[in-house]
Image (tube, grey):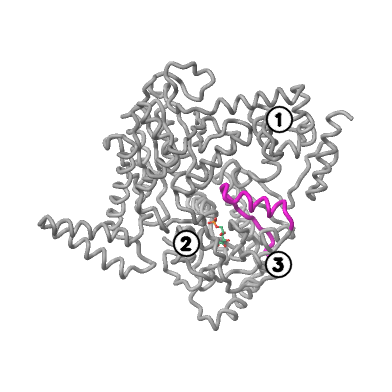
């Protein structure tokens, strides 16, 4: 039997095992039970979905019929709504023939609360288009408990009375919920009051400013009425959704992942970006699905995957391992597995350096950074005041210790992530300080009283006053300055950019504007760095990290023709949530146990972000724990692949124009 035959048979066997469908000869094998479209990014994907909705509205208009839409809230559909608003304003898309029903609303929830889905829909869509007020419906979060059951029946009846849903837009929870049909919901579940999963509440904690503020219940359209929609499109962006998307698309139909019920629908499409698609078999191990072009990136990806899945160091992989795992054509190209092993091993080896700014007077042919100039000007962009130390604290310290001129640019104030009682404590401090030193400051006293009053009586529909926001910002600035002192850079090298897009007082930010880009551009021009470090979290389209990167990218684009830029390399680190895939990493900076401890102490300077922080998210670990676990996982991975064993490692990818 030649290699090719073994390969095909293995794939077919795997396909049978995984319940995949093998096409006729030459056709890719598919593991996917739901049609899934992968787009380069969420913007492109959202435009396509908005176009489909617009086409449907117009088609119905021509037929003189109403178009009945099922709508979702959450971060995923925002870009779709933004595009629809644009189409209304610029192309005259009318919503006069639209009737819409939203999936869900928190319970109890006043419609004017800043946390309500009513307010969300008005702000994202309804207030900007010509839909009639009497034509949009959301579950009522104020219905008395005794009437909820009856109310839910009437909500479904209302949908049926207008002919049922023509189109249902869905997001998906990290736990697979659709609407708020949490795991455990049955396929025939009707519209009802449900108890939210802990993971759902934790994911919403960010918007609400703390887990304790997130309602425990919600009213949701049931699975059954969702499945009754004639057409369904589910959106998912970002790597946080990757595992659940794979489960729903390729896994069994199960109440553990309610989105898997959509496998039973005859006209459903999942629209995902590349990150949310990253766990699908065709993306994760494309060589197991179809023939691939074995370029260097693909080889690195396949070999590191093979080594991890067989739990064998790279240099111990055999020809048989390659053949048995769908990589016989790669083997045929190289002749022997050993050659491939050595090649990939060396590439990984060359990513490791204790000299992130380059090693002076050393041959840099196989090093990630240039030796020259020996002393570099380095500019670290930190979206929030603590991302520098959390994400690259070890590298930051090495750059300083190795004599480079290091600057940090704190892009936003981070003020919304400070708890109210922290702010009060600091205002109180100023008042006591003034009293102690006989400083007469009626302004400080007034600020304290106003803040105390405001924070005591604040309602859900209110956001922090500008003064409180300012106090919270100053507090975080002090913490960042403390970290800089701790690492050893002069205070004047800490640049607080206070980018305006962030200053709304809520999780919802303004789009980036000219002013934001100009601030970043001016700083780059002022420092003329040889190295820029930036947070490369592109996955979350609404996250502050992504917006901060957009501003840097735009500024770099404008500066690229300038002379100093020819000598400037850009390195990307990842935020607190995920790490780069091993095959993507281009620089890995190791840390000793002592360096790990020092980094931890640097993170501790951010006291307002310790112990039950405002934006805990669905990860209950503190930031220093996340950072340590992630850095040690990267080191462990290198070790498992057969490279040197370090305590921890920080990883970077080089960005090029
Ligand atoms: C919202 C809804 C939820 C969300 C889901 C994903 O109306 O029903 O199912 O779609 O929680 O939320 P995001 O899009 O914020 O990740």
Query: 10 Å neighbourhood of mark 2: few (<14), some, or many (≥20)?
Result: some
Q: Is residue 455 above or below residue 610?
A: below
Q: Residue at x 68, y 53 (%)?
A: 247
| Left or right of 80 on screen, residue 412 | left
Q: Which mark is residue 316?
A: 1
Q: Report x, y in % for residue 318.
A: 75, 29
Query: 10 Å neighbourhood of mark 3: few (<14), some, or many (≥20)?
Result: many
| Left or right of 635 on screen, residue 435 | left
Asked whether 352 falls inside the magenta stretch, the response is no
Q: Residue at x 79, y 48 (%)?
A: 20
Residue located beneath label 3 in the image: 187
Secondary structure found at label 1: helix
Q: Are marks 1 and 3 in contact (CB under 8 Å)?
A: no
Q: Report x, y in % for residue 361.
A: 43, 16
Q: Report x, y in % for residue 23.
A: 82, 43
Q: CA distance from mark 2 to mark 3?
A: 28 Å
The quadrant of the rendering that contains the N terminus is top right
Q: Quadrant of ligand 1?
A: bottom right
Q: Which residues are magenta?
A: 228-252
Residue 292 falls in which quadrant of the image? Answer: top right
Residue located beneath label 2 in the image: 120
Of discs 2 and 3, which sits in the foreground? 3
Q: CA distance from mark 1 to mark 3?
A: 47 Å
Q: Which mark is residue 497?
A: none
Secondary structure found at label 3: loop
Indicate which disc, 2 or 1, sits on the residue closer to the N terminus.
Answer: 2
| Left or right of 337 on screen, residue 457 | left
């Amino acid at each position: 039997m030649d290699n090719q035959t073994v390969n095909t048979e293995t794939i077919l066997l795997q396909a049978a095992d995984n319940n995949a469908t093998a096409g006729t000869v030459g056709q890719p094998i598919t593991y996917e039970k739901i049609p899934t479209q992968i787009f380069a990014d969420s913007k492109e994907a959202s435009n396509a979905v908005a176009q489909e909705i617009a086409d449907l509205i117009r088609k119905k208009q021509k037929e003189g019929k109403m178009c009945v839409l099922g709508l979702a809230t959450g971060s995923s559909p925002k870009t779709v709504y933004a595009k629809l608003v644009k189409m209304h304003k610029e192309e005259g898309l009318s919503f006069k023939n639209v009737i819409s029903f939203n999936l869900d609303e928190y319970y109890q929830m006043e419609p004017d609360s800043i946390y309500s889905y009513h307010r969300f829909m008005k702000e994202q869509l309804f207030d900007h288009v010509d839909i009639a007020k009497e034509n949009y419906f959301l579950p009522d979060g104020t219905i008395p408990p005794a009437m909820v059951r009856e109310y839910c029946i009437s909500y479904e009846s209302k949908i049926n009375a207008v002919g049922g849903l023509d189109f249902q837009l869905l997001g998906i929870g990290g736990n697979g919920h659709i609407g708020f049909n949490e795991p455990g919901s049955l396929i025939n579940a009707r519209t009802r009051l449900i108890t939210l999963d802990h993971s759902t509440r934790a994911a919403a904690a960010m918007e609400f400013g703390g887990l304790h503020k997130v309602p425990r219940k919600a009213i949701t359209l049931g699975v059954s009425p969702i499945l009754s929609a004639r057409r369904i499109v589910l959106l998912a962006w970002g790597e946080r959704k990757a595992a659940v998307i794979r489960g729903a698309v390729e896994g069994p139909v199960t109440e553990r992942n309610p989105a898997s019920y959509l496998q039973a629908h005859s006209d459903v499409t999942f629209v995902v970006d590349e990150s949310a698609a990253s766990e699908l078999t065709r993306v994760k191990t494309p060589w197991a699905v179809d023939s691939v072009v074995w370029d260097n990136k693909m080889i690195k990806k396949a070999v590191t995957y093979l080594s991890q899945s067989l739990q064998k160091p790279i240099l111990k992989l055999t020809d048989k391992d390659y053949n048995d795992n769908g990589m016989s054509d790669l083997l045929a190209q190289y002749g022997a597995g050993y050659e491939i092993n050595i090649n990939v091993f060396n590439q990984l080896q060359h990513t490791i350096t204790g000299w992130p700014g380059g090693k002076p007077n050393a041959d840099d042919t196989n090093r990630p950074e240039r030796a020259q100039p020996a002393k570099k000007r380095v500019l670290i962009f930190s979206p929030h005041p603590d991302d520098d130390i959390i994400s690259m604290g070890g590298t930051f310290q090495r750059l300083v210790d190795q004599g480079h001129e290091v600057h940090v640019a704190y892009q936003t104030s981070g003020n919304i992530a400070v708890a109210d009682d922290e702010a009060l404590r600091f205002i109180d401090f100023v008042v006591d300080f003034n009293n102690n030193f006989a400083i007469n400051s009626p302004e400080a006293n007034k600020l304290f009283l106003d803040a105390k009053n405001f924070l005591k009586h604040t309602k859900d529909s209110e956001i922090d006053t500008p003064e409180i926001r300012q106090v919270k910002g100053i507090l975080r600035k002090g913490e960042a300055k403390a970290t800089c002192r701790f690492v050893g850079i002069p205070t004047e090298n800490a640049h607080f950019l206070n980018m305006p897009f962030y200053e709304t007082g809520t999780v919802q930010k303004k789009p980036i504007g000219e002013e934001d880009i100009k601030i970043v551009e001016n700083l780059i021009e002022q420092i003329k760095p040889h190295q820029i470090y930036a947070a490369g979290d592109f996955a979350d389209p609404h996250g502050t990290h992504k917006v901060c990167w957009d501003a840097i990218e735009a500024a770099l684009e404008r500066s690229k023709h300038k002379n100093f830029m020819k000598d400037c390399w850009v390195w990307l680190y990842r935020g607190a949530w995920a790490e780069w895939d091993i095959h993507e990493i281009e620089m890995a900076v190791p840390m000793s146990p002592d360096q790990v401890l020092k980094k931890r102490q640097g993170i501790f300077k951010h006291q307002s972000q310790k112990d039950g922080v405002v934006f805990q998210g669905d990860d209950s670990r503190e930031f220093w724990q996340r950072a340590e676990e992630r850095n040690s996982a990267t080191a462990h991975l290198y070790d498992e692949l057969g490279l040197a064993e370090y305590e921890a490692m920080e990883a970077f990818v080089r960005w090029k124009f």
